[in-house]
C-alpha cells in the first residue's frame, strides 16, 4: 500500500512501522491476488450495459488531506444517488474528517481496522458483506495504484468499478479488476481527477483509456464552524495566551513526528521563523499546532523560540476546535500534509511548503493558499506512478526553501 498520491496509508495517523508493514503486504500479496481475481472477473462475463447506479461507494483508506480533495467527487455522487446511498470505506484512524464534515451519514462510513492482521481481515470481511447486502451498484477507487483498495472494490460486489489502470507500466500492476479503467494523468490536480472518476461512470467502458470531459468542478467547499467549537477554542486560547497581547495569531504546523521526514522543513527553521515573526510583529502570537503524538516536540519548539508569545496547542484541540482555530487565525505555515487541506476549508491564508511532491497535483485549494517550492530538477520525486517510493535520503528540495522566503510571505499576508 502506498500513501498521498499513491498510498492508502496516512502515516501520521497509523504509525510509520504499521504503514511500512501494510505497504509491504500490499506489494507482496497484492499482485498475485489481483491477477487471480482478474481471472475470476473475466469468467464472470461482460459488464452490464446499463450505467445508472443507485448507490456509490468510495474506497480511500488513508490520507485525510486527500479526503478533502475528494469532496467534489463525494458531492457528485450525492447529487446522483443521494446521501443515504453514498458510502466511504476508510481506515478507522482516518474517518474523523468525514464525521466532522458530515457530507454523508456517519453509518455510511465503513471502517477498516489496522490494529492487527486479524482485525484487518475481519473488518474487510465485515465491510464487503455490508456493501454486498446493500446491493452496491458502483464503486470508485480513489487510492490510485494500491492493490488493497482495488481488491476491496472488487470484493464489494459493485457492478461498475472505476479505478486507475496501468496500461504500459505507468503505475504498479493491479490486474483488470475495474470495469472502467482510466489512465493516471500526472498533469491534472488530484481534486479534478477524483471528480472525473465519478463522471467516468457515464462512459462506455470500452472507450478507455480515452476519457471524456468531466465538466466543470464545483466551487471549493467551505465549512461552517459551529459556535460551540469557536467558544471552546477561544476559551483555550485565553488560557494559553494569558495576559499577552491580543494581536494576530500565526499558526505553525511543523510535523514534529518522524512519519514523513522527506516532506519536513527542518524544525530549527520553524523556530527561526517564529522569532522573525515576533520580532517584526510584537503584538502577534505564534502557535505551534500538531497531533497528540507531536505534543512533546511541539512544546520543545515553542520553548526554543524563547518568548511567552509563542505557545503550543499540539494535541490540545479536537478536530472541530482546530477548524475553529483556523477560522480565527491570521495565517498558517505548514509542511505538505493534511492540515494544509483542512485549513483550506476555512478562510485562513495558507503557506504550504512542497518538496518531494508538487502543488500542481496536491496543493490545497483555497483563495488564500500559497505553495512554496524550490523547483529543483529532482523534485517532485514521489508520485502515484512509483508507489510513492523515493531513494532520496537528503531532502535538498525542502532545505532550499529559506526562512527569509517564508517570512516574506507571512509578512505580506499579515499586512494584507
Image (cartoon, rainbow, N blue to C red):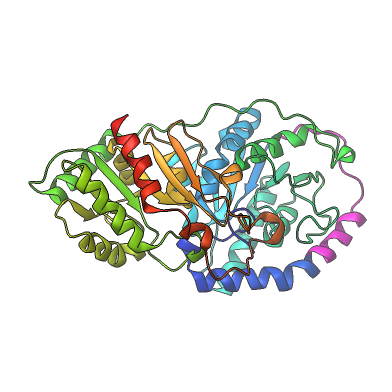
Residue 235, x across and y down, in percent: 17, 44
Whether residue 178 is visible here, answered yes or no, is yes
Viewer-closest of 167 and 133: 167
At a point 89% along the width and 53% down the height, the residue shown is 44
How many callouts does the rendering have?
0
Q: Please report the bounds of the magenta region as a residue range.
A: 34-53
At a point 51% along the width and 30% down the height, the residue shown is 220
Q: Quadrant of residue 62?
A: bottom right
Viewer-closest of 47 and 242: 242
Q: Based on the picture, tell me whether residue 72 belongs to the magenta stretch.
A: no
Which quarter of the rendered picture does the C terminus lie within? top left
Q: Is residue 27 above or below residue 206?
A: below
Q: Based on the picture, tell me whether residue 45 belongs to the magenta stretch.
A: yes
Residue 100, x across and y down, in percent: 42, 43
Which quarter of the rendered picture does the N terminus lie within? bottom right
At a point 71% along the width and 61% down the height, the residue shown is 147
Residue 124, x across and y down, in percent: 63, 62
Q: Is residue 393 above or below residue 325?
A: below
205 left or right of 201?
Answer: right
Q: Quadrant of residue 118?
A: bottom right
Residue 302, x across and y down, in percent: 24, 59
Q: Is residue 353 above or below residue 28?
A: above
Whether residue 323 is visible here, answered yes or no, is no
Amino acid at each position: 500500500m502506498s500513501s498521498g498520491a499513491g498510498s492508502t496509508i496516512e502515516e501520521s495517523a497509523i504509525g510509520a512501522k504499521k504503514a511500512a508493514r501494510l505497504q509491504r503486504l500490499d506489494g507482496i500479496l497484492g499482485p498475485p491476488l489481483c491477477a487471480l481475481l482478474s481471472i475470476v472477473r473475466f469468467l464472470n462475463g461482460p459488464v452490464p450495459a446499463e450505467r445508472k447506479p443507485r448507490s456509490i461507494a468510495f474506497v480511500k483508506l488513508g490520507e485525510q488531506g486527500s479526503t478533502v480533495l475528494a469532496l467534489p467527487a463525494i458531492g457528485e455522487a450525492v447529487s446522483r444517488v443521494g446521501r443515504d446511498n453514498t458510502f466511504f470505506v476508510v481506515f478507522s484512524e482516518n474517518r474523523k474528517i468525514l464525521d466532522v464534515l458530515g457530507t454523508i451519514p456517519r453509518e455510511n462510513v465503513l471502517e477498516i481496522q489496522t490494529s492487527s492482521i486479524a482485525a484487518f481481515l475481519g473488518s474487510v470481511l465485515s465491510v464487503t458483506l455490508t456493501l454486498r447486502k446493500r446491493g452496491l451498484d458502483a464503486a470508485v477507487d480513489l487510492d490510485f495504484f494500491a492493490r488493497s483498495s482495488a481488491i476491496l472494490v472488487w470484493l464489494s460486489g459493485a457492478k461498475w468499478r472505476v479505478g486507475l489502470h496501468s496500461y504500459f507500466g505507468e503505475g504498479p500492476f493491479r490486474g483488470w479488476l475495474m470495469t472502467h479503467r482510466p489512465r493516471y494523468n500526472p498533469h491534472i490536480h488530484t481534486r479534478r481527477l477524483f471528480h472525473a472518476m465519478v463522471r467516468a461512470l457515464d462512459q462506455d467502458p470500452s472507450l478507455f483509456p480515452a476519457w471524456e470531459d468531466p465538466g466543470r468542478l464545483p466551487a471549493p467547499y467551505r465549512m461552517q464552524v459551529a459556535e460551540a467549537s469557536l467558544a471552546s477554542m477561544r476559551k483555550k486560547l485565553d488560557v494559553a495566551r494569558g495576559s499577552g497581547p491580543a494581536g494576530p495569531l500565526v499558526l505553525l504546523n511543523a510535523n514534529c513526528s518522524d512519519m514523513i521526514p522527506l516532506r519536513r522543513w527542518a524544525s530549527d527553521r520553524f523556530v527561526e521563523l517564529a522569532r522573525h515573526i515576533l520580532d517584526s510583529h510584537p503584538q502577534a502570537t505564534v502557535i505551534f499546532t500538531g497531533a497528540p503524538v507531536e505534543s512533546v516536540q511541539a512544546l520543545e519548539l515553542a520553548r526554543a523560540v524563547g518568548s511567552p508569545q509563542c505557545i503550543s496547542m499540539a494535541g490540545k484541540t479536537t478536530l472541530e476546535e482546530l477548524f475553529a482555530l483556523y477560522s480565527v487565525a491570521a495565517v498558517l505555515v505548514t509542511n505538505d500534509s493534511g492540515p494544509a487541506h483542512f485549513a483550506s476549508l476555512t478562510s485562513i491564508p495558507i503557506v504550504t511548503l512542497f518538496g518531494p511532491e508538487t502543488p500542481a497535483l496536491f496543493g490545497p485549494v483555497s483563495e488564500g493558499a500559497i505553495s512554496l517550492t524550490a523547483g529543483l530538477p529532482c523534485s517532485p520525486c514521489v508520485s502515484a506512478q512509483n508507489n510513492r517510493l523515493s531513494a532520496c535520503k537528503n531532502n535538498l528540495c525542502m532545505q532550499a526553501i529559506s526562512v527569509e522566503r517564508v517570512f516574506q510571505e507571512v509578512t505580506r499576508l499579515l499586512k494584507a
